[in-house]
């Protein structure tokens, strides 16, 4: 099975949260309400440096994905 790069996540226990799951390396879950990130990877020193460069781009891509999905829901 091929997973999409981003998935939406929802949980009634976290009613105010807007979760986006990034399924490719580095895998993470972000709450777009407060930009809190839960990483699902273990990073060493070299990975940490690369990650710092990618974080801003990944957060922006997650936000764009969410906006696109919400536009699609509103059209239906």
Image: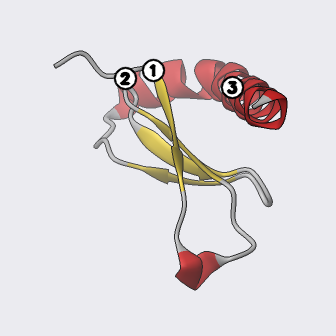
The one nearer the camera, 6 or 38, is: 6
The local secondary structure at tag 3 comes to helix
Q: Kindly check if marks 2 and 3 are in contact, taking CB atoms under 8 A apart as contact.
A: no
Mark 2 vs 3, N-terminal side: 2
Q: Which residue is mark 3?
A: 65
Mark 3 vs 1, N-terminal side: 1
Q: Residue furthest bottom?
A: 13
CA distance separating discs 2 and 1 = 6 Å
Q: Which residue is mark 2?
A: 24
Q: Residue at x 50, y 18 (%)?
A: 50
Q: How many marks?
A: 3
Give neighbour class at mark 3: few <14, some 14-19, many 20+ (Cα, 10 Å): some
Q: Residue at x 74, y 36 (%)?
A: 73
Q: Which residue is mark 1?
A: 5
The one nearer the camera, 19 or 57, is: 19
Name the image quarter holding the C terminus: top right
Location of residue 69 with respect to 21 vertically, above or below: above
Name the image quarter holding the N terminus: top left
Q: Kindly check if marks 2 and 1 are in contact, taking CB atoms under 8 A apart as contact.
A: yes
In the figure, is residue 69 to the left or right of 52?
A: right
């Amino acid at each position: 099975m091929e997973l999409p790069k981003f998935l939406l996540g929802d949980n009634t226990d976290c009613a105010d949260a807007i979760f986006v799951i990034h399924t490719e390396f580095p895998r993470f879950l972000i709450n777009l309400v407060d930009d809190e990130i839960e990483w699902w990877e273990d990073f060493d020193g070299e990975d940490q440096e690369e990650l710092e460069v990618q974080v801003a781009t990944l957060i922006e891509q997650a936000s764009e994905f969410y906006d696109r999905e919400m536009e699609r829901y509103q059209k239906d």
